Structure formats: structure tokens, C-alpha cells
Amino acid sequence: MFAFLPITQASSESDKFASDLVNSLQNGASLNSGQKIFTASVAFGQAKYYTDNLRENIFRGIRQKIRRGEMPAKAPLGYYNEPRICTIEPDKATFNKMKKILELFAKGNHTLTKIQDEMFSAGLVGRYGKPHSLSSIPAILSNPFYYGMFMHKGELIQGSHKPMISKKLF
């Protein structure tokens, strides 16, 4: 009759009711009275209201983080996400290595393949310990995060993190 996804966690009475209702419908029960249909509508309405509010609060937090100059994403190579204070900090193990790679690239006499080799020999590796793919090198090297800015939804925003290089060098 209906194809519902199972509700795995009930955190309130309405969620518990909705969970029981979905389980009943999946086991062959039907909504045969107006009162059951009305109660189900109210429970699902409350669940939707809760998730919509949760979504809005998450987006509000992201906008606030951006206003403070904090990038709401995974840190680029040379930095790491500090979980205790929810900021992006220089990674002691890779910050200077990545800075050296950016300086080599800025000189203009190295090919992307040579930069890829330099990154690998410096220990700046991709997933599974392999070198970064050649197609990912331009994106890494052209990331404005390295000179103190970051992109969010096509807009360049001044970051509050420690820049790796100057805008002039970039």
C-alpha cells in the first residue's frame, strides 16, 4: 500500500507513534478510520516541523561561521580541522611541506607532473598513500585558502585562519 522508510529512532511521543504506524503499515495493517488518519497526519506534520527547524538551525550556524571567517568544510592540504574549538589550524606535519610546494609552483618553472612528484616525495599523499592524481593538482594549487581567503557558493570570503603564503606569491 505505502512504501515508507523505517523510522529507526524515536525521540518523542509523536515520533514513537509515527514509528509504530509505519511498522504497522509495513506489516500489512491499513488506515481504516478517520481518527487514525488524522492522528497519523498530525504525527507526520510534527516530525516534518522538527526536521525543518533542525535544517534551518544548521544553515543558521553555517552562515554564522562564514561571517566569522571560518570555512565550514574539510580543511585543505597543510591544515586540519581542530575539533575542540571547531576551527581550521595549520597542520604541523604538512604545513611547511605544502608551503614549499606552493613556492615551487609560484616560480613557474615546474610542470604539474614535477609538482606531483615533489608532493609525493615530501609525503603529501592522497588516499591510500598514493600520489595525488594529476587532475587534482591544479585545484589544490589554486585554492585561495592558502592566501587567507575561501570560496563559498561562488563568493570569495576573507578567512580568519593563518595564511600559508601571501596573495602576491599566489
Image (cartoon, rainbow, N blue to C red):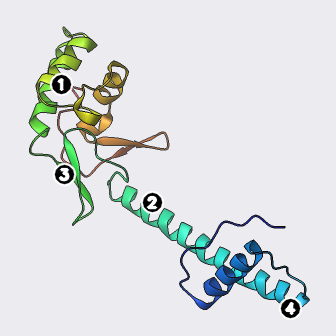
- Identity of the residue drawn at 19% across and 39% down: 78
Disc 2 element = helix
Q: Amino acid at mark 4?
A: Gln
Q: Earlier in the sequence, mark 3 or mark 4?
A: 4
The residue mark sitting in front, 4 or 2, is: 4
Q: Position of residue 126 (x, y in %)?
A: 27, 32
**Residue behind mark 3:** 89
**Residue behind mark 4:** 35
Q: Earlier in the sequence, mark 4 or mark 1?
A: 4
Relative placement, left or right, of 94 versus 127 is: left
Disc 4 element = helix
Q: Position of residue 85 (x, y in %)?
A: 23, 65
Marks 2/3: CA distance?
A: 20 Å
**Residue behind mark 1:** 119
Q: Amino acid at mark 1?
A: Met
Return the residue nearer the eye: 30 or 145. Answer: 30
User: Based on the displayed image, in which of its 4 quarters is residue 53 positioned?
Assistant: bottom right
The quarter in which the N terminus is drawn is: bottom right
